[in-house]
Image (cartoon, grey):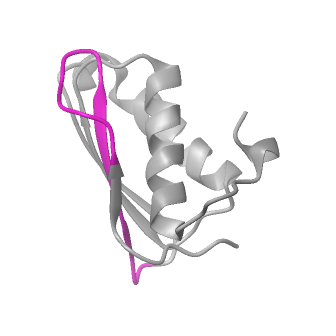
Amino acid sequence: MSKILEPAHAGTLESSDVFVRVVPSEQNGIEIELESSVSEIYGEAIELLIKETAEAMNIRNIRILVQDKGALDYVIKARVQTAILRAQGTVSPDWSVLS
């Protein structure tokens, strides 16, 4: 299991992008707070994508705060991965889990 060392973020608040902030959590598991302009329609799918992305990177005990401005799935996934890698202080990621 990978560990989050410090808070980090990725993305912007521009239209069609997403701002992701990750912080270490004392809670066991993955906490997600989603604020999205499309949450009524896609909220559950976005949360599932965020959770699956963190799990694929073997991350637990994390709080992920997301402000979505209509980003596509691949953008959301890339921003979550980037924020997690920054929080870990990773210079050379394991590319096999970043598919």
Residue 35 vs residue 77: left or right? left
For this orientation, the residue located farthest to the bottom is 26
Name above or below for residue 70 compared with residue 54.
above
Residue at 35%, 19% in the rendered image: 71
Q: Residue 29 in the image: state x and y as whole percent.
A: 51, 69
Name above or below for residue 71 compared with residue 58.
above
**Residue 76 lies in the magenta stretch:** no
Q: Residue 73 in the image: state x and y as whole percent.
A: 49, 21
The residue closer to the viewer here, 34 or 14, is 14
Residue at 22%, 23% in the rendered image: 69
The residue closer to the viewer here, 51 or 6, is 6
Residue 99 vs residue 84: left or right? right
For this orientation, the residue located farthest to the front is 91
Residue at 45%, 25% in the rendered image: 75
Q: Residue 3 in the image: state x and y as whole percent.
A: 58, 75
Figure label count: 0
The quadrant the C terminus occupies is: top right
Kindly indicate the quadrant of the structure image that contains residue 93. bottom right
Residue at 76%, 53% in the rendered image: 94
Name above or below for residue 63 compared with residue 54.
below
In the image, the segment drawn in magenta is 10-27
The quadrant the N terminus occupies is: bottom right
Q: Residue 10 in the image: state x and y as whole percent.
A: 35, 44
The residue closer to the viewer here, 6 or 65, is 6
**Residue 22 lies in the magenta stretch:** yes
The residue closer to the viewer here, 40 or 96, is 96
Name above or below for residue 27 compared with residue 55.
below
